[in-house]
Image (cartoon, helix red, strand yellow):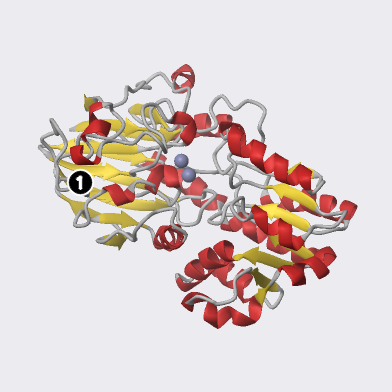
Amino acid sequence: MRIGFFGGVREIGGNIILIEDKGSGIVFDFGRRFASSFTFFNNTIVGRPQKGFSDYTELGELPPFNSFYNTPKEVNNPLDIKIGGVFFSHAHLDHIGNINLIKEIMPKYMSKYSMSILKYFVQFGIIKNMPQNTNIIEDEITLGNFKVKPFFVDHDVPGAVAYIIETPKGTVIYTGDLYFQGIEKEKTLNFVSYAKSLKPYLLISEGTRIGWGGITSLTEDELQEEIIRCVITFKGLAIGNVYEPHISRILSFYKVARNLGRKLVMTETYAFALVELAIANNAIAKEIIDSKETFIYSSKKLLDDWEAPLKNKFVDANFVNTEQENIILLLNYTNIPELLDIKPKSGAIYIQSGGEPIANIDTHNTKIQENWINYFKMPFFRIHSPGHASEVEILNMVKEINPEILLPIHTQIPERFAMIFERTKILDKGNLYEF
Ligand SMILES: [Zn+2]
Ligand SMILES: [Zn+2]
């Protein structure tokens, strides 16, 4: 059996993992790299279309998979491996963002909430097209010599799974991204005890927060208390910037609004994500979107089809401007120019609670955001908690699961794992390792 890592090596995000046995392969995640990791290409310099994806595979930016890409031209010098399917751990762009590069007939598997969030990405052009042959995975499925089973874990997006892969060489476990302080932390704790009971051969573990030092985790309850303290101090409009798929954080702002007797107003991007999750029976999404105190902000005149059943919830800038002391407003980074119509009064505050810009790896956008907030003279608060296990939590998890071999990915400092776990293998990008 061979395993290759084509993304997420010495970087956070962009995960692409190939597991192969006797010429048949399966792939886990097909993520987009964060802009801070761009090496040869960016939004201006792109590969030459007439070469298919060969410019990318030649430079190690994409894996040289055969008969895999959504282009008639095969890549140069492809691996002689037939890939049977791609399994997505969760719907964050660094795991799912390049799904459109995969050819339509390739089977793709993800949880039902990941599918809801994929629809949100497509609706707002973040992912170009809804991919074909996308299947919901709930139970174990067999592909060639592999049996693949999803195991739900907590993360800052609903529907995140780890994968348990039965291979001819033993059990391989891929953690995906996970979190121990969220509202569904039981899932992650259950995963750890289950993974340990399997005595796995290989554990492929995320390590996002390795080396992040002083950043601590706050529970959602602690975050709510902090948000409430800020809102009651300044008394004006409270604007929260949250990532749309981060439903437990949206729930926190919803609870703050309920607690303070305020209305929760959100842009259409949040509403669409909630509607899709509610259709997939997500109880939290249903509660928030169905509440009489939840409203949708829009500056346009005509409603889309999905919005029509919610038409009584729609409010405009005038409503928010007049009612601002009674509103918690969820406004994402992209929609920040709406503030020109909303006209925040003195006492309005801006709370960064995840979402774009992504902290210190996104300095350019952080500066733009800062300029907007200063223009409106709003106090700025960063009230956030990362959706990943802390360094100590992840290292203890690894010791607890105790695999025969540990393979760290999605981390800038894989060596840190080797300090506490002897059987750690430090990976190079693009190599195929024999296991
Ligand atoms: Zn990730
Ligand atoms: Zn993630």
Few, some or many C-alpha atoms within 10 Å of disc 1 (few <14, some 14-19, many ≥20)?
A: some
Residue at (19%, 48%) from the top-left corner? 71
Residue 175, x across and y down, in percent: 41, 41
Q: Label 1, secondary structure: give it.
A: strand
- Amino acid type, label 1: Phe
Residue at (28%, 47%) from the top-left corner? 101
- Relative to the observer, which residue lies in front, 57 or 407? 57
Q: In the displayed structure, would residue 305 be above or below residue 217?
A: below
Residue 393, x across and y down, in percent: 56, 34
Residue at (39%, 32%) from the top-left corner? 8
Q: Quadrant of the C terminus?
A: top left
Q: In the displayed structure, would residue 312 be above or below residue 17?
A: below
Residue 304, x across and y down, in percent: 50, 75
- Relative to the observer, which residue lies in front, 173 or 80? 80
- Relative to the observer, which residue lies in front, 155 or 193? 155
Q: In the displayed structure, would residue 408 be above or below residue 228?
A: above
Q: Quadrant of the N terminus?
A: top left
Q: In the displayed structure, would residue 15 be above or below residue 132?
A: above
Is 343 left, or right, of 84 in this rendering? Answer: right
Is 387 left, or right, of 163 in this rendering? Answer: right
- Residue 261 visible (yes or no): no
Is 22 left, or right, of 178 in this rendering? Answer: left
Is 364 left, or right, of 85 in this rendering? Answer: right
Residue 214, x across and y down, in percent: 67, 28
The residue at which mark 1 appears reads as: 146
- Relative to the observer, which residue lies in front, 200 or 163? 163
* Quadrant hosting residue 298: bottom right
